[in-house]
Amino acid sequence: MVGLLLVVAIPFVTNIILSFTKWAGIGSPSFIGFDNYIRLLRDGNFWVSFLNSIAMIVSMALVPTAISLLLAALLSDFIGSKFGPRIASFFRAGFYLPQILPVTVVGILWGWILLPSSGVLNSVLDGAGLGALKSNWLGQPSTALAAVMAVMVWFQVGYCLVMFMAGLARTDPSLTEAASLDGATWPQRFFHVIIPQLKPEIYVVLLTTSITALKVFAPIFVLTKGGPGNATTVPSYFAWQNFFSKNQVGYGSTISTVMTILIIILAMIFLKVQSKGQEH
């Protein structure tokens, strides 16, 4: 309780108080009421970063969840049953590997892969006769966000996959076997037997990955530093810029406060929906 108070409650309340001030980080803050919030509503850069955070939700929550559900079912139904649980565990560990890599390593790895001149991706495209598709993936506004989204999908799939495979371990295999004996095809078993049984895990995965997407910072910092321009800026990085680069602590606090409130609202909505789903 004391730890929660020291680590969460006091910093959060302090952040809210600072959001009503103008402060450069030194000297005494000046109380300015809701000016920072009014400025935030009119700040085009913030709305760009907010839209980018929605793109992060797509790439860190929705797409990895869909891919992982499919992979978990394939590993459980095909790989596990035909080649044994050890092979399935091997693939699961392989997909989870990005989660245990330090973010700096991930940034260096993908920065090397996506290099414009000697990067692996452009070299592969060149070798395949698709040189026209070569691009400065992280250096152009038109491709930077899509490139970062692709990296985040790769990064997140492992976490979702482990959660869903753990969920499949607790489900009743006789239901899938019965559906199979009744002539259900694999897609029918996947959509009507496997997914309904994994609803609790799907709620948890979507909630945790969506929250992670809304506060993502390190991958953006390592890969693009929000650029080029503000093409990949997200609210947490935008807040960091105002805190430490522009010395606008009050405005940075405002961005952080708004995003914290949005995350709390999102979590409450997820929990409410999950609660209703369990009642049904």
Image (cartoon, rainbow, N blue to C red):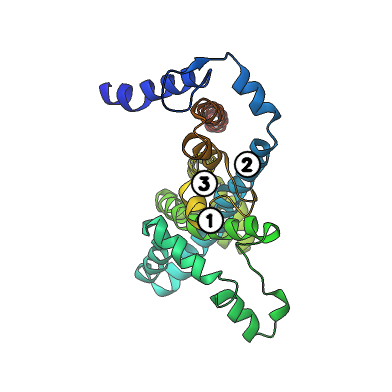
* Closer-to-camera residue (196/251): 251
Which mark identifies residue 110? none
Bin the neighbour count of mark 3 within 10 Å (Cα to Cα): few under 14, some 14-19, many 20 and up.
some
Which residue has dot 3 on it? 197
Q: Position of residue 209 (x, y in %)?
A: 50, 44
What amino acid type should be assigned to the residue bearing mark 3? Gln
- Which residue occupies 57% across, 15% down? 32
Q: Is residue 92 left or right of residue 7?
A: right
Q: Position of residue 72 (x, y in %)?
A: 49, 59
Q: Position of residue 120 (x, y in %)?
A: 54, 76
* Closer-to-camera residue (153/217): 217
Tag 1, which secondary structure?
A: helix
Kindly indicate the quadrant of the structure image that contains residue 7: top left
Kindly indicate the quadrant of the structure image that contains residue 133: bottom right
- Which residue occupies 52% across, 42% down? 237
Tell me if residue 246 comes above or below residue 167 in the rendering: above
All told, the count of numbered labels is 3
Which residue has dot 1 on it? 152
* Closer-to-camera residue (86/251): 251
Which residue has dot 2 on it? 49
